[in-house]
Amino acid sequence: MINSLLVLIASIIPRRSVLSLFELERRREKGDSSAAEELKREVLLEDVFSLRHAAEALLLVLAVITGVAVFGPLFGALIAVVIALVYGRVARFEFVHNLAQRIYEQYEHGVLNFVEHHPSVGKLIRTVTIPQNDAMICSREELEHAVENASAILTQNEIKMITNSLHFEERRVEEIMTPRGVITSIDKNEIIGPLTLHELHESGHSRFPVTDGDIDHVIGVLHVKDLLSLNDKKTQTAEGAMEPKVYYINQDQTLQHALAAFLKTRHHMFIVVNGYRETAGVVTLEDVIEALLGRKIVDEFDVHDDLRIVAERNAKSNNNSTHGTNV
């Protein structure tokens, strides 16, 4: 009886979760009751294994005592040695393991409750250290957590790039666009002369919306590089030198959608509009790539590190008449 019980207990291998502790904790916080149970099992697993180990040792001692009592010191000791050498091998037989698992699963809830409510017992008998669960990554949040804690094998730039790519499809055009308040535009009737070229170049941009009256009526895009290489010596207006094709994108569209649109149209700048078709800003392919990489791409036309910061600074003087009233 003792020997059979020893074999069965040795054959028990408490089930490990296929999810990591991080993922179980994340799902538990979202109200997943099954994840909460899995987390409880994983947390208590060391004490369960230690309890099994203690039960094995106790039963092995009882087997020795019983053998000596029944067969005498010599034969009893010999039988005890045989049991100690053989019971582990027998416990690995598949039919024995399956039987032991079925029995354990019937009483697992009680075992977990015991080790949970008697932590002092677990601390006293704890002799087993469970290796970290080698679970698969099952969510984007878990992958991000793993990346953020991988500084030993990834550089900070690599960590930032991977993290940005994980959230890329969630981000909106509005987050990265050049806001309306700092858009440098040019009216369609403005003459393209040396002074205008100098002003455009000094603005720090390479492309400019061409407007018909105001910024809510963009009719084309003017490229500085094209202007610098013009061979036509005749005076031109912005309308005559601009690229007439204009693409509009809603400020609520995702960066993933914007990137696909840039690749499809082979255009480098979109006019960002709101729900009323008013100009909310502009976004470039460079802006989207920077958001994907998580770092600034600097070229010869860059002046400001972050035009959104410039817009916020300028907002202090926008629509701020001394005779004005907010309603």
Image (cartoon, rainbow, N blue to C red):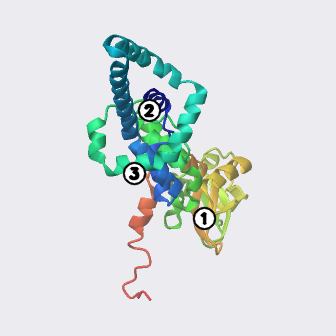
Asked whether residue 279 is in view, the answer is yes
At label 3, counting other C-alpha atoms closer than 10 Å, the crowd grade (few under 14, some 14-19, many 20 or more) is few
How far apart marks 1 and 2 lie (CA) works out to 33 Å
Name the residue located 36 percent from the left edge and 46 percent from the top edge. Answer: 115
Among the 4 quarters of the image, the one containing residue 71? top left
Which is more foreground, mark 1 or mark 3?
A: 3
Q: Whole-percent x and y of residue 310?
A: 42, 61
Q: Whole-percent x and y of residue 255?
A: 60, 54
| Residue position marked by numbered label 3 in the rendering | 113
Query: Horizontally, is 312 left or right of 32 in the view?
Result: left
Task: Please tell me which of labels 1 and 2 falls first in the chain.
Answer: 2
Please state which amino acid type lies under the numbered disc 3: Asn
Vertical placement of residue 240 versus 276, above or below? above
Which is more foreground, mark 3 or mark 2?
A: 3
How far apart marks 3 and 2 lie (CA) works out to 41 Å
At label 2, counting other C-alpha atoms closer than 10 Å, the crowd grade (few under 14, some 14-19, many 20 or more) is few
Q: Nearer the viewer, residue 20 or 151?
A: 20
| Residue position marked by numbered label 2 in the rendering | 154
Vertical placement of residue 286 versus 159, above or below? below
Query: Horizontally, is 134 left or right of 190 in the view?
Result: left
Name the residue located 41 percent from the left edge and 15 percent from the top edge. Answer: 79
| Residue position marked by numbered label 1 in the rendering | 252
Task: Report if the CB atoms under discs 3 and 2 are less than 8 Å apart.
Answer: no
Q: Nearer the viewer, residue 54 or 161?
A: 54
Q: Nearer the viewer, residue 142 or 132?
A: 132
Helix, strand or loop for disc 3: helix
Q: How many marks?
A: 3
Please state which amino acid type lies under the numbered disc 1: Asp
Helix, strand or loop for disc 1: loop
Vertical placement of residue 295 versus 28, above or below? above
Please state which amino acid type lies under the numbered disc 2: Leu
